[in-house]
Image (cartoon, rainbow, N blue to C red):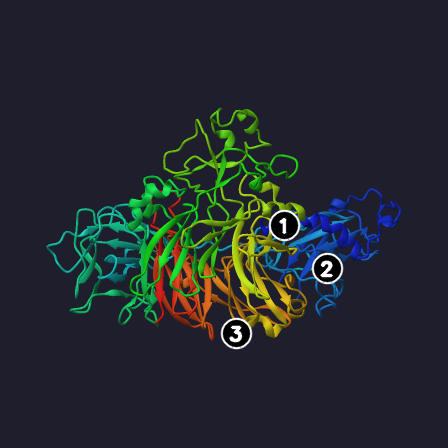
């Protein structure tokens, strides 16, 4: 549920309480004789919100009487509230009169009248300010009488009805508190912006690397369309056949077009907006000159320094002067200066395992994208690195497996894939609720119903010399415009031997609503004669032997039972993935190994003692009102938080609510209990709305938390900086990441370095890891990694960074970037 829906859903329930807090009395409210000064025939629909302002010298709401008689407000009947239901409504005092055609001004957060105002209702010390994207609610007898909301992320400066009491006007108007509203200023008609040939430049050139390319840039504020055969590109050799930019090719305003003169098709890591050379074939060499022609005339050119390659040369900023020396290669993206630090990158692909596909599928691994081989189909999601930094495990969520990576310097390799098999929902220990339509939350076992474990987050630990991987078995379906595996059980034709009671099972209160796959192990959809139903996710967490892939423990339906008992099971998600375990982390508390499993849909964190890996013990279920959808979990040991009086702490980044919370074991409690429990300590809201708080990392020296912010109303991707102190959490800064890509997916911190995983504007193009110095937030360096880097992690000694690069397909499924793993060496 989105944060906006949450606010709206609870606002109505809170109105009566808010009015009571501001002095309403139910007996008085029901007394028809209370308002003795107001004629009985007065139509209260004439009392409306007329003008609002949330910025300037003071915030205000102007109320207007559109009737032909004056109106006197009665005791406890009327109040004003903003969009935050936790605030106390401002009561309009009994006896306040508003003349016919007159105004009443409410200053929502003022304790005294400003010099320019002679009369108003004051919000007082318990009042509230009006903010960006807020709502003004006029309340009458416990219900919303009139309201007005303004755009998310923007202030109301100033908005009102025109004429008074009429429709709300489009656009801002002059502030006229207690006076007639004026019409908004007519918007000046702007001259249409057009792009012309002289707006097109050669912007970047590379003659060495994964592929040669020439990037064109459109410096205009309007898109440009190439026509006919007007535009061609040629190197310095006139005997070569030029590349013609096809008729109808569009380059966006301030956008890019990449031309690859010696490639005939799309290549891995290149953006979608490319022009391949078709039948032409010339590479770009040392000392070459790249020439752009328009209607046969030279429009722009660039000459590579004699006897050297360009890797890469470009303008800084885009469309500006050519930089001295190489810049950082950014085909189809904003140009960046050369990385301050040289970062050596090794990117590993899965091509070497293509011949193992059939054997892996026989053990529950999945390769099922349209026409894809294993290397193209895998989608690396999460990274876990062994304590000795020699081995890593990467979750392949959609494929239902774990990849094992050898991290030996200069010999890095993907050594094997561990298939994870199937959850058996026919066992009572795995019984599930499979319908969002039945009354209740009963858990039922269903024969011949299986679930792919499909882990999202993973982490690793060592016990008695053996490496183990713990996984949150969320599940995920491929559902794209060009390919969807999803179906519901009631869409299938079930085999009557396997399902003799098929008609009953396919009812919507039983199994009919359960989401399943038509493509369990191949790209050929199967919807008839179904002998096994395959669901998404294990609805559990598991512990796996990191060497063999053997499942040592699975929690079965523990998570469902815990959330049902707590009254927070998300029954509306029963047909999908239930409580949806998504995130996991571990840490040592009083010498015991704790595991924390974040459940996205239940908005809760299960805490287990997993010291005995064959028999983990439930300890507690963490929830905090207002926190929704824990996406990122971070354990902080005693060394990191002891100065704040804690023996250990857990930080949760909550995606839907945009909040960051800290739970902790107070040092005193740790001393008094063998198995101490965590309790909520602090919460801070990250500005940006939904998705403003996703993944979090911590610098224990500076006591700073770094939070991934892709907020729905944020100004581009950024990392927010939250400082932990003995008084709580406070947002103290932010790092703007717009220059490095379209979205930030993950963060990690080690030894004073912050690593940030950025996806490209074109998701199928190679992404970037930007590394910052936490001491002053300055850039340390950046490196090109695989397509769609989803998770980033530091080695334990801080000498290298790893990313799991998901390589997700495009929505039409015409382009499917290869999944990969990148290792960035810092020294």
Determine the CA span between mark 3 and mark 2.
44 Å
Front-most of 103 and 330? 330
- Looking at the rendered image, the disc whose residue lies closer to the viewer, 3 or 1, is 3
Q: Is residue 737 visible?
A: yes
Q: In front here: 706 or 113? A: 706
- Give the left or right position of residue 517, taking residue 36 as reference: left
Q: Residues within 10 Å of mark 1 (few under 14, many from 20)?
A: some
Q: Earlier in the sequence, mark 3 or mark 1?
A: 1
Whether residue 53 sits left or right of residue 505 in the image: it is right
Which residue, given by chain and number where applicable, does mark 2 sit on?
A: 106
Residues at marks 1 and 2 touching, judged by CB atoms closer than 8 Å? no
Tag nearer the camera, 3 or 2 = 3
Label drawn at residue 6: 1
Query: Residue 236 in the image: x percent, y percent?
Result: 15, 60
What residue is rendered at 65% in x and 49% in y? 8
**Comparing marks 1 and 2, which lies closer to the viewer?**
1
């Amino acid at each position: 549920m989105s944060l906006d829906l949450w606010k709206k859903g609870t606002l109505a329930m809170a109105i009566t309480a808010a009015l009571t807090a501001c002095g309403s009395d139910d007996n008085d409210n029901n007394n028809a004789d209370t308002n003795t000064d107001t004629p009985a025939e007065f139509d209260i629909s004439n009392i409306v919100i007329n003008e609002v302002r949330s910025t300037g010298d003071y915030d205000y709401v102007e109320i207007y009487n559109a009737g032909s008689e004056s109106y006197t407000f009665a005791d406890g009947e009327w109040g004003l509230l903003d969009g935050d239901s936790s605030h106390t409504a401002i009561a309009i005092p009994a006896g306040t009169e508003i003349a016919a055609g007159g105004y009443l001004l409410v200053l929502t957060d003022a304790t005294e009248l400003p010099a320019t105002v002679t009369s108003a209702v004051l919000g007082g010390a318990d009042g509230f300010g009006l903010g960006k994207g807020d709502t003004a609610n006029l309340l009458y007898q416990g219900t919303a009488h009139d309201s007005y909301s303004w755009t998310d992320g923007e202030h109301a400066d100033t908005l009102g009805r025109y004429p008074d009491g009429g429709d709300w006007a489009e656009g801002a108007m002059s502030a006229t508190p207690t006076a007639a509203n004026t019409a908004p200023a007519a918007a000046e008609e702007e001259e249409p912006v057009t792009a012309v040939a002289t707006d097109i430049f050669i912007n970047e050139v590379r003659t060495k690397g994964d592929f040669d390319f020439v990037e064109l840039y459109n410096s205009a504020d309007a898109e440009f369309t190439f026509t006919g055969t007007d535009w061609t590109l040629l190197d310095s050799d006139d005997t070569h056949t030029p590349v013609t930019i096809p008729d109808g090719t569009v380059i966006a305003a301030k956008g890019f077009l990449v031309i690859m003169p010696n490639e005939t098709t799309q290549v891995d890591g290149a953006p979608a907006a490319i022009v391949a050379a078709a039948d032409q074939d010339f590479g770009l060499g040392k000392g070459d000159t790249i020439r752009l022609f328009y209607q046969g005339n030279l429009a722009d050119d660039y000459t590579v320094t004699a006897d050297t390659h360009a890797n890469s040369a470009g303008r800084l900023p885009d469309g500006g002067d050519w930089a001295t020396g190489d810049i950082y290669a950014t085909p189809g993206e904003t140009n960046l200066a050369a990385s301050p630090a040289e970062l050596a990158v090794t990117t590993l692909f899965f091509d070497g395992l293509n011949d193992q596909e059939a054997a892996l599928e026989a053990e529950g691994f999945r390769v099922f994208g349209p026409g894809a081989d294993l290397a193209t189909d895998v989608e690396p999601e999460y990274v876990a690195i062994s304590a000795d930094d020699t081995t890593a495990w990467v979750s392949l969520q959609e494929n239902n497996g774990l990849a094992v990576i050898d991290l030996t310097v200069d010999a890095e390799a993907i050594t094997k894939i561990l298939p994870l098999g199937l959850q058996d929902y026919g066992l009572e220990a795995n019984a599930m609720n499979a319908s969002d339509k039945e009354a209740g939350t009963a858990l039922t076992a269903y024969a011949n119903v299986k679930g792919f474990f499909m882990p999202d987050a993973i982490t690793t630990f060592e016990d008695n010399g053996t490496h183990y991987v713990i996984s949150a078995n969320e599940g995920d379906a491929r559902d794209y415009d060009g390919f969807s595996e999803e179906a519901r059980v009631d869409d299938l034709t079930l085999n009557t031997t396997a399902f003799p009671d098929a008609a009953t099972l396919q009812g919507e209160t039983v199994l009919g609503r359960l989401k399943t796959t038509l493509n369990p192990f191949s790209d050929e959809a199967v919807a008839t004669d179904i002998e096994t139903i395959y669901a998404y996710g294990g609805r559990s967490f598991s512990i796996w032997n990191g060497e063999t892939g053997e499942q040592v423990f699975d929690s079965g339906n523990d998570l469902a039972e815990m959330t049902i008992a707590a009254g927070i099971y998300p029954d509306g998600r029963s047909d999908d993935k239930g409580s949806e375990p998504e995130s996991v982390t571990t840490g040592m508390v009083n010498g015991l190994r704790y595991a924390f499993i974040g459940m996205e849909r239940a908005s809760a964190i299960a805490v287990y003692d997993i010291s005995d890996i064959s028999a983990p013990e439930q300890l507690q279920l963490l929830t905090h009102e207002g926190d929704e959808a824990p996406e990122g979990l971070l354990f902080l040991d005693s060394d990191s938080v002891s100065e704040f009086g804690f023996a250990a702490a857990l930080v949760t980044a909550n995606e839907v609510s945009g909040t960051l919370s800290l739970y902790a074991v107070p040092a005193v409690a740790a001393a008094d209990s063998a198995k101490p429990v965590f309790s909520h300590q602090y919460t801070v809201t990250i500005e940006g709305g939904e998705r403003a708080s996703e993944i979090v990392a911590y610098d224990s020296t500076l006591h700073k938390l770094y939070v991934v912010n892709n907020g729905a109303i944020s100004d581009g991707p950024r990392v927010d900086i939250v400082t932990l102190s003995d008084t709580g959490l406070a947002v103290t800064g932010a790092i703007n990441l717009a220059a490095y890509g379209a979205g930030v997916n993950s963060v990690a911190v080690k030894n004073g370095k912050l690593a940030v995983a950025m996806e490209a504007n074109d998701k199928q193009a190679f992404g970037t890891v930007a590394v910052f110095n936490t001491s002053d937030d300055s850039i340390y360096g950046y490196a090109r990694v695989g397509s769609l880097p989803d998770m980033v992690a530091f080695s334990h000694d801080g000498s290298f960074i790893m990313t799991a690069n998901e390589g997700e397909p495009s929505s039409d499924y015409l382009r499917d970037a290869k999944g990969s793993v990148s290792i960035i060496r810092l020294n």
